[in-house]
Structures are given as structure tokens and as C-alpha cells.
């Protein structure tokens, strides 16, 4: 069937047969389907939606568009585990979670993505480390997983190639938020990676793609159900993205925050809570902890002992980065020329923020892409970001902007002031829990 006829069926609200989905995805992989046709089908799916059988068929077609990885031949002595997030601003949990799981006996072949829309990308953060190969060959990938216990990389050309092409087109065509496409995109990579278990971090709030809690829960249920049905034990945690996660938003600045945590610095409380919850969930799924409480204790011990930091250093060195990244990270990671404190007109308490707008401000500063081929400035971003309920004023900024020139710094500072609410007379309320709910397969 012609690609345009398949598009027409979905455009008009029809249901696509598995054979039609397979045919379209095969055309995406072979480039017989044009970029415009991919964009058209994505928009039709966004507007019309897909049934669960269609979603399963799309996920399977995309995961089988390339090679399926296997790990049994390596003789690993632990489960193959992974985590994925739907994305947020300052979401850097993967940078710590991978080494944590490895330090606790699991193996993490994490296939991550680049920035999408207003959110940052894990690969962009690792690109700030000189020499780090985010696109290693398969032999090196497997070697680092076996030896370090974790390897965080991007999609190789032969791993779910249809998803890689669709993912790039969605980023610039206004079709990122589709529940069906998000489910298929995430799981295509994860199923192709040969996992035993998966935990999903599905975010809701102003900085999430699925801002509405009900829609986010529907996505969590979709992912857990489709993945578990495909043979990968999966649970999802619904987590709050109504404020920047941690103290930083950018690439190198987020890497610094995580390295300092791994080295023993006290992490921002919400960042630690969500990272430990996701890691503990994986340890339970993989049989490495009896419950979440034990899993969190193992995480804390892995940080305190330096075992997680050692795994991080092994991974970085194994993938071509500097062997002394922990000792000399300030030397290796790029720094912006200008730093500008963002102070409110009057002292008060942070009562809310438009996190999506803050993410867009980081992209406009150069920390993300407006188009697929755009270069990223890994040095720019935000640090010392205040959390809701914290006091700010002339001596305690809302954030510090890291930019390459004064004009960009001032423009970004103005955007932060416009999108962070500060009230002078405000009684600090009990903060909302960052981990709202656990979702299992239906």
C-alpha cells in the first residue's frame, strides 16, 4: 500500500492493520517513505490516537527495524536493567542511576537520547566530556557493559533505526507529545537492547511533555502494559516536574552536579529522592533487593563507599573519556565565559515556576537545538536554581546564568524572572512528594 494511503486511513480515524504498520516502518528504515510522510503520519497519530493493538504493532515494528541485542553470551552474573524518563528540565538521574545499579550488581546497557523540545538529553550531557564515545561500535559497547557494569550511549545505526529517524522528525514537527509515539519510541530502543527489566520515570507538571497528571498516568500504564506484554518486566513511577530537578539545567553544569554527588557532596533532596526511588525499583525488579527500602539503603551505601563513583569513572574511561574525570572534572568540562546571578526585584519565597519556559530559555541560550542539525554549546546553562519554598533575594539568587556573552546572559535572566513566581509574604507549605505513584502493567 502506498504510504499516503496508510496516512489517509489514520488521518480519517481508521485503524491500521499490523501489516500496514510493518510496511510503513519498513519504508521509514529504507528511506522509501519521505520525511514529509513520516511527519504526516506522526501528526495523524497525535490527533487521532492509536488503539492498544496498533501501539503494540508499532512498537514491535520499530524495535525489529534493526538488530536485537543479546547478553547471555557474555556470561553476566546479574540482571540486565535499564531506566527511561519521558524528559524534564534538569533531569539528570541517569548519570547517577547507571553507576548505582552497576555498583549494586546489575548491568545497564542504557540507550539514551538527545534533547527533545524543551528538555535536555542525556547524550548531550555526556558529549560535554572530551573523548567520550556516545556512538561506540557494538564490541566496545558490550565490553564496557561487561567490565564497568554500565554504558550510557546513543542509538547505534543498526539499533531501532526507524525510531531514530522518526524521533528526529518529531522533535521539529510538533508531534513530541503523542502518547502512542512516545510509547513506541521508548520501547523500540528498550526492547532492541535485550533487557530483563525496565523502570519508567513518567513525569507530569509544567516541565513535562505530558503536563496533565491523568494523561501522564495513561502513558505510564501504556508503557508498562506494552513492555511487560513484550517480555520485559516493567513498572513506572509518576514523578513531579513542576520545578527544575536538582540545582542545574544545561549539559556540563548538570554533569558537574552529578559528579560532585558521586564524590560525596550532599545532593538536592528531590533529585536524590527520585534517583534513589527509580534505582531501588530496578533493584527489586531484578531480584537485587527485597523491597524499595532495602534498595534505597543499597544506593546510599554505594554512594558512601565510592563504589558508584568508581563505576562511573570506569564507564567514562572505557568509552574514551579521561580516566581521571572524577579528580579533574573542572579541567575537562567546558565553562561559559559569563556568569550572571538572577535576583528578584524584592526578597521573598519561590512559590512556583513555568518549567517548560525555563527549559526553552536554556535551549535559546544554546544549550539545546531548535533544528535537528543545530550545534549545542555544552557550557551554557543554569546553576544554583532555587526550589519552591526557598527564600530568594539580593544575597540569594533564583539562579545563576552561564552564558558566552553579557547580552545572552541578561536576556536569559529576564526570562527566568518572568517565569519564576516570588512572593514576599508567603507561608511555606509542605512540598508535594516528587514520587506520586507507582504504575504496574494492566
Image (spheres, rainbow, N blue to C red):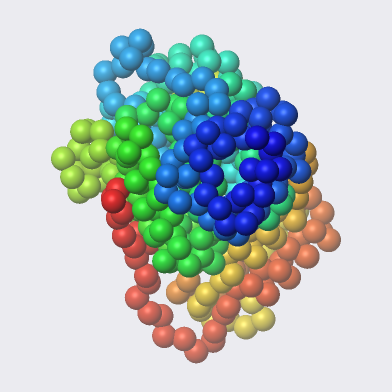
One can see residue 111 in this view: no
Indicate the quadrant where residue 289 lies: top left
One can see residue 340 in this view: yes
Give how far across and how far down residue 432 sits, in percent: 37, 70
Residue furthest to the bottom in view is 425
Give how far across and how far down residue 234 sits, in percent: 32, 41
User: Height in image: 430 above or below 167?
Assistant: below
Q: Residue at x 42, y 44 (%)?
A: 53
- With 288 as the anchor, is 96 left or right in this view? right
Give how far across and how far down residue 55 sits, in percent: 47, 45
Indicate the quadrant where residue 438 lies: bottom left
Give how far across and how far down residue 186 sits, in percent: 49, 41
Q: Residue at x 31, y 12 (%)?
A: 75
Q: Residue at x 66, y 68 (%)?
A: 416
| Near-viewer residue (252 or 154) | 154
Residue furthest to the left in view is 290
| Near-viewer residue (25 or 234) | 25
Q: Residue at x 33, y 14 (%)?
A: 72
Amino acid at each position: 500500500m502506498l504510504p499516503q494511503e496508510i496516512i489517509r486511513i489514520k488521518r480519517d480515524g481508521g485503524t491500521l492493520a499490523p501489516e500496514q504498520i510493518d510496511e510503513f516502518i519498513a519504508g521509514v528504515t529504507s528511506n522509501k517513505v519521505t520525511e514529509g510522510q513520516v511527519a504526516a503520519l506522526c501528526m495523524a497519530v497525535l490527533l487521532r490516537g492509536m488503539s492498544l493493538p496498533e501501539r503494540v504493532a508499532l512498537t514491535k515494528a520499530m524495535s525489529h527495524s534493526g538488530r536485537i541485542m543479546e547478553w547471555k553470551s557474555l556470561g553476566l552474573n546479574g540482571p540486565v536493567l535499564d531506566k527511561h524518563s519521558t524528559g524534564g528540565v534538569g533531569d539528570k538521574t541517569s548519570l547517577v542511576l547507571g553507576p548505582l545499579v552497576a555498583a549494586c550488581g546489575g548491568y545497564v546497557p542504557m540507550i539514551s537520547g538527545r534533547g527533545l523540545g524543551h528538555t535536555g538529553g542525556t547524550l548531550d550531557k555526556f558529549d560535554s566530556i572530551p573523548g567520550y564515545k556516545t556512538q561506540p561500535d557494538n564490541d566496545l559497547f558490550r565490553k564496557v557493559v561487561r567490565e564497568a557494569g554500565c554504558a550510557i550511549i546513543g542509538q547505534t545505526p543498526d539499533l531501532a533505526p526507524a525510531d531514530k529517524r522518526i524521533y528526529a522528525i518529531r522533535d521539529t514537527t510538533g508531534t513530541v507529545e503523542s502518547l502512542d509515539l512516545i510509547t513506541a519510541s521508548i520501547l523500540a530502543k528498550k526492547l532492541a537492547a535485550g533487557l530483563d527489566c525496565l523502570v519508567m520515570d513518567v513525569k507530569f507538571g509544567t516541565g513535562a511533555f505530558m503536563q496533565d497528571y491523568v494523561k501522564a498516568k495513561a502513558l505510564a500504564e501504556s508503557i508498562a502494559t506494552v513492555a511487560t506484554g513484550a517480555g520485559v518486566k516493567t513498572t513506572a513511577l509518576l514523578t513531579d516536574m513542576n520545578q527544575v530537578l536538582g540545582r542545574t539545567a544545561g549539559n556540563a553544569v548538570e554533569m558537574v552536579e552529578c559528579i560532585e554527588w558521586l564524590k560525596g557532596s550532599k545532593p538536592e533532596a528531590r533529585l536524590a529522592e527520585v534517583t534513589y526511588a527509580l534505582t531501588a525499583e530496578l533493584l527489586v525488579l531484578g531480584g537485587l533487593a527485597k523491597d524499595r527500602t532495602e534498595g534505597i539503603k543499597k544506593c546510599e551505601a554505594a554512594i558512601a563507599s565510592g563504589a558508584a563513583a568508581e563505576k562511573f569513572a570506569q564507564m567514562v574511561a572505557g568509552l574514551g573519556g579521561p580516566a581521571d574525570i572524577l579528580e579533574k572534572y573542572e579541567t575537562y568540562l567546558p565553562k561559559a565565559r559569563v556568569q550572571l546571578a538572577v535576583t528578584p526585584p524584592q526578597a521573598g519565597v519561590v512559590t512556583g515556576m513555568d518549567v517548560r519556559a525555563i527549559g526553552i530559555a536554556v535551549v535559546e541560550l544554546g544549550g539545546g537545538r531548535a533544528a535537528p542539525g543545530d550545534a549545542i554549546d555544552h557550557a551554557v546553562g543554569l546553576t544554583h536554581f532555587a526550589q519552591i519554598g526557598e527564600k530568594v533575594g539580593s544575597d540569594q539568587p533564583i539562579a545563576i546564568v552561564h552564558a558566552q556573552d553579557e547580552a545572552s546572559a541578561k536576556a536569559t535572566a529576564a526570562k527566568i524572572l518572568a517565569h519564576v513566581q516570588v512572593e514576599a509574604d508567603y507561608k511555606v507549605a509542605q512540598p508535594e512528594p516528587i514520587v506520586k505513584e507507582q504504575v504496574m502493567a494492566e
